[in-house]
Image (tube, rainbow, N blue to C red):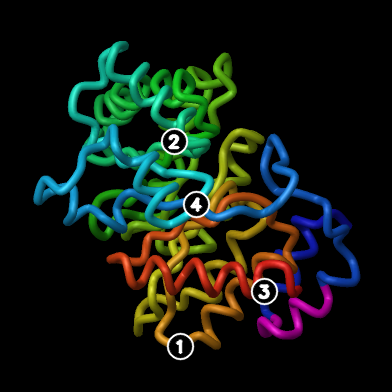
Amino acid sequence: MNRRDFLEKTAVLGAAGLITLVMTMIPSTQSLAGTPPVKDDISLAQWALVEEIRTGKWKNLDFPRIAREDFGLNGIEFVNTLFEVPTEGYLKKLKQNAATHGVAMVLIMVDDEGDGCGATAAERKQFDINHRKWVDIAHYLGCHAIRTNCRGPEHADKKEALKWAAESYHMLLDYAAASGISIVIENHGGVSNDPDWMVALMKEVNNPAFGTYPDWRKPAPDFDNLTYLQKTLPYAKGMSYRNQPSDELTVKMIQLSQAAGYKGWYGIESSGREEIKKGIGLLKEHLLKV
């Protein structure tokens, strides 16, 4: 039984039981990403400081310096809507700033460019077209992936939605193949909040450059974040880390990720500097303890 099948078959187990089992059956060096990083690391998601950018405290070009000097982090995760003018000269400056501060540019979170589960062929094609430029920019900057949204129309039939999304992502993945950029989906509502639907989509598309980017949202009556993480971990190519209502739950999610064999970036998206620093502390304390 391979690791993916094993995790899916044990999804009904509790987190503690799952952790114990996978620890004994999965090599700790095995990675879920297409290009395995050698270790876990912490990156800063730009959205965590979006209010500072909106009020003019700093700009996108300053992001590498902020991550290194203010937080001592090795990676950054961009939001496309915060790029001022992504011309070649601008992108060269961004690359130079990242090199100067020794910061890896991890991925670009793409918003406002269409939905990966459009109900019409025209919407699906436009989604592909709109995201191509961000694939190219991510490649130029040295990122490994772009993050997309896949919500679908309200009350969409999930079987139909699966067909729509598969078509969209087949097109975008075909375009991204030459650059080696991965395409990931973050659970931002709609069908992407359903872990079983997401797993079905991963299987339907069946492309090693396609994956999930679990958003560690706080638990809610209509969203079990621990179960979501557990089921989508076999396909994870990144983590949108958020501090949980209790440190105990945060640690449980870190341990679950580690035990499942995930190796890579944990992008802190908790809002504000104090929450970012708290997340850094928890990750540094517990990442290597599983």
The residue where tag 4 is placed is 73
The amino acid type, in three-letter code, at marker 3 is Gln
The amino acid type, in three-letter code, at marker 4 is Leu
Residue nearest the observer in this picture, 57 or 131 = 57
> Is residue 287 at all visible to an observer of this figure?
yes
Q: How far apart are marks 1 and 3 (CA)?
A: 14 Å
For marks 4 and 3, give the one nearer the viewer.
Answer: 4
Residue nearest the observer in this picture, 74 or 12 = 74
Mark 4 vs mark 2: which is more N-terminal? 4
| Placement of 255 over or under 194, stated as above or below | below
The residue where tag 1 is placed is 246
Q: Answer few, some or many: residues within 10 Å of disc 3's Cα (few below 14, many 20 plus, some between 14 and 19).
A: some
The residue where tag 3 is placed is 255
Residue 260, picture quadrant: bottom right
Residue nearest the observer in this picture, 222 or 93 = 93
Magenta extent: 13-21
The amino acid type, in three-letter code, at marker 2 is Ile
Q: Do the residues labelled 1 and 2 touch (CB within 8 Å)?
A: no
Mark 1 vs mark 3: which is more N-terminal? 1
Q: Does the magenta stretch include residue 14?
A: yes
Mark 1 vs mark 4: which is more N-terminal? 4
Where disc 4 sits, the SS reads loop
Q: How far apart are marks 1 and 4 (CA)?
A: 24 Å
Q: How far apart are marks 4 and 3 (CA)?
A: 21 Å
Residue nearest the observer in this picture, 123 or 172 = 172
Magenta span: helix, strand or loop, mainly?
helix
Q: Distance between the residues labelled 2 and 3?
A: 25 Å
Percent x, y of residue 153:
25, 50
The residue where tag 2 is placed is 146
Q: Answer few, some or many: residues within 10 Å of disc 2's Cα (few below 14, many 20 plus, some between 14 and 19).
A: many
Where disc 3 sits, the SS reads helix
Percent x, y of residue 66:
35, 47
